Image (spheres, rainbow, N blue to C red):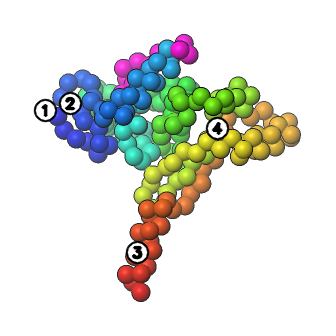
């Protein structure tokens, strides 16, 4: 039996979730990336990453645990937290502090444009978080990161990573607000 969960990932009754093709492609690339960097993407880590990548919104740890239990009934919070710790440490996901949730990194695996991660820390990113629909979009604006990290170093602070979270409304939610305003007028 196969059912569709809320993250649009197909979950089979076997022990392994079946993800949509684009997610499977990212998982395969993440596995290769891990191997090339001396890391191991275990099956549990792969499944947690797949659940995160399958969701259009940032995923909370307990939401991930509930989804993981669809295929691993005995999964416990430490299982998810260990997988999340690994995925964060390797840069495959980001934690959105504002939401206490996680999103897949759109940059780490595909970085081919010469980012100097060693100079500026493990990774830096900016997120646009829509307060309407709850979606988060990652930006990778090196110019923003360079200014902030240079300012930190100028006062003797040694930065290790930098994440900026910007809250507002996405284009779709702005249109919905405008449509609702004109309906009320």
Mark found first going from the N terminus, 1 or 3: 1
**Vertical arrangement, residue 145 with respect to residue 185, above or below:** above
Q: Is residue 127 above or below residue 2?
A: below
Distance between mark 3 and mark 4 Cα atoms: 36 Å
| Mark 4 / mark 1, whichever is N-terminal | 1
Q: Are marks 1 and 2 in contact (CB under 8 Å)?
A: yes
Q: Earlier in the sequence, mark 4 or mark 2?
A: 2
Q: Residue 153, image x and y in percent?
A: 82, 37
Give yes or no for residue 40 being in the magenta stretch: yes
Measure how far apart labels 4 and 2 are at the Cα level.
36 Å
Name the residue beneath numbered marker 4.
124
**To which residue does mark 3 refer?**
179
Query: Is residue 44 shown to the viewer in this render?
Result: yes
Is 92 magenta? The answer is no
Contact, mark 4 vs mark 1 (Cβ under 8 Å): no
- N-term-proximal mark, 3 vs 4: 4
The local secondary structure at tag 4 comes to strand
Q: Residue furthest left?
A: 1
Spot the residue most to the front.
113
Horizontal side of residue 65 vs 73, given as left or right: right
Callout 2 crowding tier (Cα within 10 Å): few <14, some 14–19, many ≥20: some
Please name the residue shown 41% across and 37% down the image: 52
Highlighted magenta segment, given as a residue range? 36-47
């Amino acid at each position: 039996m196969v059912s569709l969960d809320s993250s649009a990932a197909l979950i089979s009754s076997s022990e392994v979730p079946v993800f949509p093709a684009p997610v499977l492609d990212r998982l395969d690339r993440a596995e290769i990336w891990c191997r090339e960097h001396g890391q191991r993407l275990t099956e549990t880590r792969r499944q947690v990453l797949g659940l995160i990548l399958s969701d259009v919104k940032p995923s909370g740890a307990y939401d991930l645990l509930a989804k993981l239990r669809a295929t691993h009934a005995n999964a416990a919070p430490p299982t998810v937290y260990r997988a999340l710790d690994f995925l964060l440490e390797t840069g495959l996901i980001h934690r959105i502090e504002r939401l206490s949730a996680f999103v897949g990194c759109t940059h780490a695996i595909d970085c081919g444009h010469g980012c100097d991660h060693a100079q500026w820390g493990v990774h830096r990113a900016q997120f646009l978080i829509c307060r309407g629909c709850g979606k988060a979009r990652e930006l990778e604006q090196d110019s923003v990161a360079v200014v902030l990290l240079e300012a930190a170093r100028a006062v003797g602070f040694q930065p290790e990573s930098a994440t900026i979270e910007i809250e507002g409304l996405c284009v779709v939610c702005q249109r919905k607000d405008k449509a609702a305003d004109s309906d009320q007028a």
